[in-house]
Amino acid sequence: MKLNYISGLIALAILGCKSDEEGTTPTYKELTEAVYASGNVYPQNEYRLFAEADGVLTRQLVNEGDSVGNNQLLFVLESASTDARSQAAANIYRQSEANLTQSSPVLNELETQIRTTRTRVENDSINYVRQQGLYEKNATSKAELERAELAYRTSRNELAARQQALQRTRNQLYVELQNARSQYQVTSVDANNYRLRSYGSGKVYEVYKKPGELVRRTEAVALIGSSNHAYVQMAVDESDFTKVKVGQEVLIKVDAFDQKVYKARVSKIYPKLNRVDQSFRVDAEFEGEAPEGYYGLTVEANIIISQNNRALTLPKTYVVGGDSVWIQEGSEKKKIKISKGAENLDLVEVKSGLTENTVVLKPM
């Protein structure tokens, strides 16, 4: 079992046992059991800002240590090919919009043709009616009447055809406008991929790229996290992992702050074993004051497993085989088993098997 404590971090009573060269007696005292862990301090809501397109970094609007707001523009990339596609899509979109307005040259030409054809239909209709009247009075030939009728039907069919052509053109121009708008929106989204914005307010902890450098898609450009909320990420030895529970108190020593001790509580336990160092990850949230605004501070911690203000304790050096002790009973020395409770580096709690009057002998 890997149990340890930080000097000055946890007050463990190790004095007061009545002992001599022959033995000692168990003593009631305060006993704290803790699991040692090492780790680092990280900001809450930490994330890396990744590029979503290939480009050259042309503008860096923030530096390490700067505070940022939500959706704030931080970096700008450029790509010649993307800029050209974006400009072409914008031009096509504007032209498509113009083709559907009242001043559209394409539609105006068709509407002019329709007005001309409609005038011709009206004239041909008048002439046809006039020829019918003349024919009824035998003042014209049947051939003239038929020519007038043919001219009227031809111009009327031409008018219908031009009206259909106008509607087809309108429909085609509308479809072209929708396609141009979609393409413009796609290129606009692509253009936005070259403008990197924050996902939330916080602080810039590291910038990985500088202006003039090429940035590849999915390549990290900056590290951002909360500026005023931090947590501790600890590594707990495999042998102690089952002792740790959510909600347990944690005492944390940060070397960078003159051995200052912070309080926290276990907030999350990760069930996956890190096979490299045979440890489990355990996170803790600070309570009260915390070393905020810094990334990766190294800490040592004690996770408080149990605290007993009045525990019957015995020096661990008197325990034999993990669960037995030698005692003096009258004139005899005998080996008995005990039930242990909490323990630290020096003391073990005796749950049963001994009293405060029992004389415990040093191992033979």
Image (tube, rainbow, N blue to C red):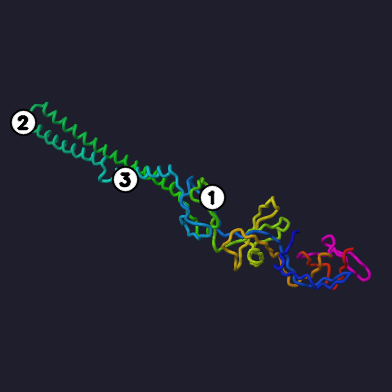
Residue 62 badge: none
How far apart marks 1 and 2 lie (CA) works out to: 95 Å
Residue 290: horizontal and vertical position, in percent?
60, 66
Could you tell me which secondary element the residue under label 3 belongs to?
A: helix
- The kind of residue tagged 3 is Glu
- The kind of residue tagged 1 is Ala
Q: Which residue is mark 3?
A: 97
Does the magenta run of residues contain 127? Answer: no
Q: Nearer the viewer, residue 90 or 157?
A: 90
Instruction: Look at 75% across and 71% down and name the residue there.
Output: 30
Mark 3 residue crowding within 10 angstroms, few (<14) / some (14–19) / many (20+): some
Residue 234: horizontal and vertical position, in percent?
65, 58
Q: Quadrant of the C terminus?
A: bottom right
Left or right of 283, for residue 325: right
Does the magenta run of residues contain 335? Answer: yes
Q: Which residue is mark 1?
A: 220
How far apart marks 3 and 2 lie (CA) works out to: 57 Å
Mark 2 residue crowding within 10 angstroms, few (<14) / some (14–19) / many (20+): few
- The kind of residue tagged 2 is Lys
Residue 137 badge: 2
Instruction: Look at 11% across and 34% down and name the residue there.
Output: 127
Could you tell me which secondary element the residue under label 1 belongs to?
A: strand
Residue 310: horizontal and vertical position, in percent?
75, 72
Q: Are marks 1 and 2 in contact (CB under 8 Å)?
A: no
Q: Quadrant of residue 280?
A: bottom right
- The count of marks equals 3
**265 to 54, vertically: above or below:** below
Instruction: Look at 74% across and 61% down and name the residue there.
Output: 3
Residue 73: horizontal and vertical position, in percent?
46, 55
